[in-house]
Image: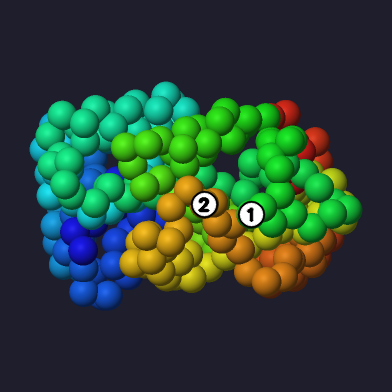
């Protein structure tokens, strides 16, 4: 297959692009950074240095089998996601041969669309009735992707990532080191008793490969990407504090960003 990964130098996009290349597919990778383009080339990923919406990659849409949207790290992510999807739809309508199979479009959402639920187990078939405030726009966008008639739309919802450069968890070690130097407890925004749904970056990358290769039977579906079990946040913090040598342990604090409160 010919696959384009948007956000190919990111924490999700890079492992996914690597895994697709290892599986024998022709992989294009969009990145804003000329420096990171060299990293993509070294992994046999064809780099496209461009903004998330750009003629530099839109002009190859007629030749593609799959597009993976893994753009992240932007305050304008809601706007960008909608703009990218519309640009792909318009390009497909204007330039893709109608006799060709539908272009598969895999949108990267996240399990925060399920909101905070400490009593029930939620799955990829659970209704999205209480998303975290920060991502409350995503359920509607997911539906647009999955129901778009010109595309074979699929949604993947990663849970919190770990592995490689550490994702969100990488910051914990810096905070723990700082707490040790200042002789205080490691503090973390949230409430006691929480559990995190997690997935390793490489396991998530494997899911992208499986879904892309089986896109014909995955169209119109959403997949939660998470380990079979959750992890205690209390235990994670206790271990980080211990490993870092924080003698006073850890404590929870009120989050500065209230939009994130119900996800912690």
Q: Position of residue 143 (x, y in %)?
A: 52, 36
Q: Is 253 located above or below residue 256 in the figure? A: below
Q: Position of residue 188 (x, y in %)?
A: 74, 48
Q: Nearer the viewer, residue 169 or 134?
A: 134
Q: Nearer the viewer, residue 156 or 263?
A: 156
SS category of the residue bearing label 1: loop
Q: How many marks?
A: 2
Q: Nearer the viewer, mark 1 or mark 2?
A: 2
Q: Identify which residue is drawn at 43% across, 61% down.
A: 217
Q: Quadrant of residue 190?
A: top right
- Residue 246 visible to the viewer: no
10 Å crowding of disc 2: few (<14), some (14-19), many (20+):
some
Q: Which residue is mark 1?
A: 124
Query: Split into 4 quadrants, where in the image is the N terminus?
Result: bottom left
Cβ–Cβ below 8 Å for labels 1 and 2? yes
SS category of the residue bearing label 2: loop
Q: Position of residue 214 (x, y in %)?
A: 38, 66
Query: Split into 4 quadrants, where in the image is the C terminus?
Result: top right
- Residue 259 visible to the viewer: yes
Q: Is residue 223 left or right of residue 239?
A: left
Q: Identify which residue is drawn at 73% across, 36% down.
A: 129
Q: Which residue is mark 2?
A: 221
Q: Is 244 located above or below residue 262 in the figure? A: below
CA gap between label 1 and label 2 equals: 9 Å
Q: Is residue 63 left or right of residue 224?
A: left
Q: Is 264 located above or below residue 20 in the figure? A: above
Q: Which mark sits nearer the N-terminus, 1 or 2?
A: 1
Q: Nearer the viewer, residue 100 or 89?
A: 100
Q: Position of residue 10 (x, y in %)?
A: 36, 51
Q: Is 260 located above or below residue 102 in the figure? A: above
């Amino acid at each position: 297959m010919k696959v384009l990964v948007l956000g190919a130098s990111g924490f999700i996009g890079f492992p996914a692009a690597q895994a697709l290349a290892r599986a024998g597919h022709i992989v294009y990778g969009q990145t804003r950074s000329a420096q990171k383009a060299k990293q993509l080339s070294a992994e046999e990923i064809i780099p496209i240095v461009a903004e998330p919406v750009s003629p530099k990659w839109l002009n190859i849409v007629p030749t593609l089998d799959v597009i993976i949207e893994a753009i992240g790290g932007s305050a304008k992510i809601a706007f960008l996601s909608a703009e990218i999807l519309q640009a792909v739809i318009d390009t497909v309508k204007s330039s893709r041969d109608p006799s060709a199979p539908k272009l598969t479009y895999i949108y990267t959402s996240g399990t925060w669309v399920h909101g905070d639920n400490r009593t029930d187990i939620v799955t990829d078939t659970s209704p999205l009735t209480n998303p975290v405030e920060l991502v409350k726009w995503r359920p509607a966008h997911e539906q647009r992707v999955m129901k778009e008639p010109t595309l074979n739309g699929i949604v993947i919802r990663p849970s919190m990532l770990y592995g490689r450069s550490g994702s969100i968890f990488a910051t914990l070690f810096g905070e723990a080191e700082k707490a040790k130097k200042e002789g205080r407890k490691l503090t973390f925004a949230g409430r006691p008793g929480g559990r995190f749904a997690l997935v390793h970056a490489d396991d998530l990358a494997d899911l992208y490969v499986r879904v892309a290769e089986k896109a014909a039977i995955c169209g119109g579906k959403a997949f939660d990407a998470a380990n079979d079990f959750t992890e205690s946040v209390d235990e994670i913090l206790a271990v980080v504090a211990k490993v870092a040598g924080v003698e006073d342990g850890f404590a929870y604090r009120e989050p500065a960003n209230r939009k994130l409160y119900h996800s912690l």
